[in-house]
Amino acid sequence: MALPERRRGRRREGGTGNGCRLKQEESPLKKKASQITAVRLPAEVVCRIDTLVGKGNRSKFIAAAVEKELNPPKRPPSS
């Protein structure tokens, strides 16, 4: 049995050229590009995040944590 061909989405404005499609947030205050991404996290981790920041702020917290990990503070050169 042959598998169905995978559909390729149309290229949208705002693409990065590496396959990522970015969508502008609709908030008039923050015009950052965003993309919906499904990530599996242990239930205990999700519960701890929700307890710390509230369910409505989960995505913002995770995005900030990832940004912090991707852009660590620069150390001053050792002398």
Image (cartoon, rainbow, N blue to C red):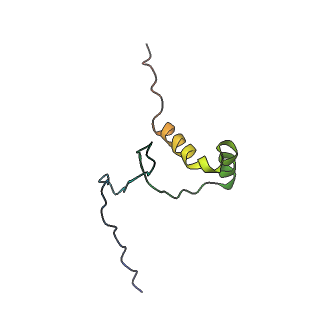
Query: Viewer-proximal residue, 25 or 60?
Result: 25
State left or right for residue 76 relative to residue 60. left
Quadrant where the image shows the C terminus: top left
Residue 71 coordinates in the image, percent (x, y): 45, 35
**The one of 51 and 77 positioned closer to us in this rendering:** 51
Residue pictured at 46% horizontal, 39% vertical: 70
Residue 66, position in %: x, y? Answer: 51, 43
**Of all residues shown, which one is farthest toward the top?**
79
Q: 58 or 1: nearer the eye?
A: 58
Q: Quadrant of residue 76?
A: top left
Residue 21 position within the rendered picture, expressed as x and y whole percent measured from the top left: 36, 57
- At 37% from the left and 73% from the top, the residue drawn is 6
Q: How many marks?
A: 0
Residue 30: quadrant of the picture: top left
Instruction: Give the position of the N terminus as an image quadrant.
Output: bottom left
Between 11 and 44, the one nearer to me in the picture: 11
Q: Is residue 17 above or below residue 67?
A: below
- Taking the spot 44% from the left edge, 52% from the top edge, the residue there is 26
Q: Residue furthest bottom?
A: 1
Which residue is the extreme one toward the front?
Answer: 28
